[in-house]
């Protein structure tokens, strides 16, 4: 790796820069200047020593130049060296390849690279947040004196620091969300593959549902048989690319059925309430009204197909960062929601959910917290 780095020419360059550390490091953004710059790295001034292999973000500000975009670049970098100097430390940084490094390379390619140096800030000095007056005794050894910063310069620098900190917080939050989305995607795909293989097996076996399936408080369905129409689906976040698909939701749809219908008889004056109950649960039906000897409507007979259509849907609750499972018509008619940590969606939970689907004894409620809608 060292030989490859040496093949990249380094140019003397005094560009404004800032070092933004990971939020866990609890360090403020450090404003500084580059000593030199290349396509793959840079060296910068620093008031503090930094441990080798520290990962940080370098915020680079190119000088004002014609035809060169004046915008902040944010390449990630790794500290490879730290050498003490009279005014602090000189840090050697290697850039990490990402989109920001591509932008930096594009800007460097706009400049004249035939010499030993790049255009730099005029009278560039290491920024700080206080007014600095340089005493004559500090101007020894032929070194140029550091000019004092005006109050306006200080305010400008503080404002820049504030903006950089805010931008870094936004970027850190976005990166954390991307990491979380990737974890969720991988976990959902694990469950998707499990249920895809499960449906293949059950579509072939066609097991019988072993216990009565309650039809609200009217009757029970019995001897229901698995139908070979079960299927799984997966959904990706937008935007997506062919090589970077992030999955945010998966579902399993299945049904148990038996030929024929269940008949439910209700008094005519309460049949509207029965209709509402069936419609709220999405249960198909047909109804026939009958009359008594005096020609008045007195009964309503509901004919309900012995067909249970059920579904499980897994997706991420972006507000809580947890996974949510919504079940519809599993074990009984209605919708139930479960919410749990990502790590809970494992082999054990999937096996227990399978027992729930098949009407067997399970411990899903003990594994994850239950909250009914």
Image (cartoon, rainbow, N blue to C red):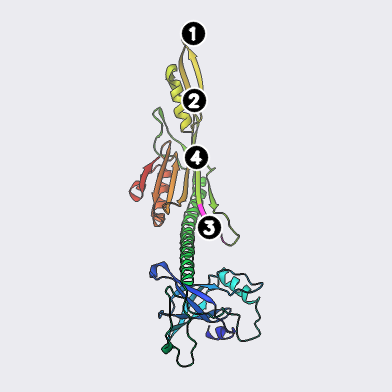
Real-space CA distance between mark 1 and mark 2, rounded to the nearest whole angstrom: 23 Å
Of the residues under marks 2 and 3, which one precedes in the sequence? 3
Of the residues under marks 1 and 2, which one precedes in the sequence? 1
Left or right side of 60 for 328: left
Pair 4/1: label in front:
1
Of the residues under marks 4 and 1, which one precedes in the sequence? 4
Disc 1 element:
loop
Tell me whether circle 3 and circle 1 mark residues in contact (CB < 8 Å): no
Pair 1/2: label in front:
1
Kindly identify which residue carries mark 1: 295
Disc 3 element:
loop
**Quarter holding residue 213:** top left
Tell me whether circle 3 and circle 4 mark residues in contact (CB < 8 Å): no
Kindly identify which residue carries mark 4: 255
Report the predominant secondary structure element of the magenta stretch.
loop
Q: Residue at x 51, y 40 (%)?
A: 227
Of the residues under marks 3 and 1, which one precedes in the sequence? 3
Of the residues under marks 3 and 4, which one precedes in the sequence? 3
Q: Is residue 76 above or below residue 278?
A: below
Q: Which residues are magenta?
A: 244-248
Residue 260 image offset from top left, x and y in percent: 50, 29
Foreground residue among 202 and 346: 346
Of the residues under marks 2 and 4, which one precedes in the sequence? 4
Real-space CA distance between mark 3 and mark 4, rounded to the nearest whole angstrom: 29 Å
Circle count: 4
Kindly identify which residue carries mark 3: 246
How many C-alpha atoms fall within 10 Å of the one at disc 4: few (<14), some, or many (≥20)?
A: some
Kindly identify which residue carries mark 2: 303
**Magenta-span inclusion, residue 247:** yes
Residue 338 image offset from top left, x and y in percent: 40, 46
Q: Residue at x 46, y 45 (%)?
A: 312
Pair 3/4: label in front:
3
């Amino acid at each position: 790796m060292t030989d490859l780095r040496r093949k990249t020419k380094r140019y003397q360059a005094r560009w404004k820069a800032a070092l933004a550390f990971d939020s866990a490091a609890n360090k403020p953004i450090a404003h500084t200047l580059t000593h030199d710059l290349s396509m793959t790295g840079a060296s910068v001034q620093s008031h503090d020593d930094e441990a080798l292999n520290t990962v940080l973000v370098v915020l680079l500000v190119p000088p004002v130049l014609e035809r060169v975009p004046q915008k902040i670049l944010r390449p990630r970098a790794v500290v490879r060296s730290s050498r003490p100097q009279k005014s602090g430390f000189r840090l050697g940084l290697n850039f990490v390849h990402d989109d920001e490094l591509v932008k930096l390379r594009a800007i460097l390619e706009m400049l004249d690279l035939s010499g030993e140096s790049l255009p730099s800030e005029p009278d560039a000095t290491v920024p700080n947040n206080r007014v600095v007056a340089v005493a004559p005794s500090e101007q020894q050894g032929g070194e140029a004196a550091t000019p004092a910063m005006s109050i306006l310069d200080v305010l400008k620098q503080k404002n820049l620091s504030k903006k950089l900190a805010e931008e870094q917080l936004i970027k850190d939050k976005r990166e954390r969300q991307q990491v979380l989305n990737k974890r969720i995607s991988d976990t959902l795909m694990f469950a998707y593959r499990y249920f895809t293989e499960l449906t293949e097996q059950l579509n072939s076996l066609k097991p019988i549902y072993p216990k009565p399936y309650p039809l609200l408080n009217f009757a029970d369905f019995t001897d229901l048989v698995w139908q070979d129409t079960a299927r799984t689906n997966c959904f990706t976040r937008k935007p997506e690319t062919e090589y970077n698909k992030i999955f945010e939701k998966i579902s399993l749809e299945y049904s148990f059925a038996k030929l024929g219908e269940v008949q439910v008889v209700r008094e005519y004056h309460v049949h509207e309430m029965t209709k509402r109950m069936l419609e709220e649960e999405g249960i198909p039906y047909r109804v026939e009204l009958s009359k008594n000897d005096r020609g008045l409507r007195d009964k309503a007979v509901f004919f309900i197909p012995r067909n249970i259509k059920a579904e499980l849907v897994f997706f991420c609750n972006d507000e809580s960062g947890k996974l949510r499972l919504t079940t519809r018509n599993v074990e009984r008619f209605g919708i139930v929601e479960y919410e749990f940590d990502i790590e809970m969606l494992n082999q054990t939970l999937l096996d227990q959910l399978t027992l729930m689907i098949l009407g067997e004894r399970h411990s899903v409620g003990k594994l994850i917290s239950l909250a009914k809608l």
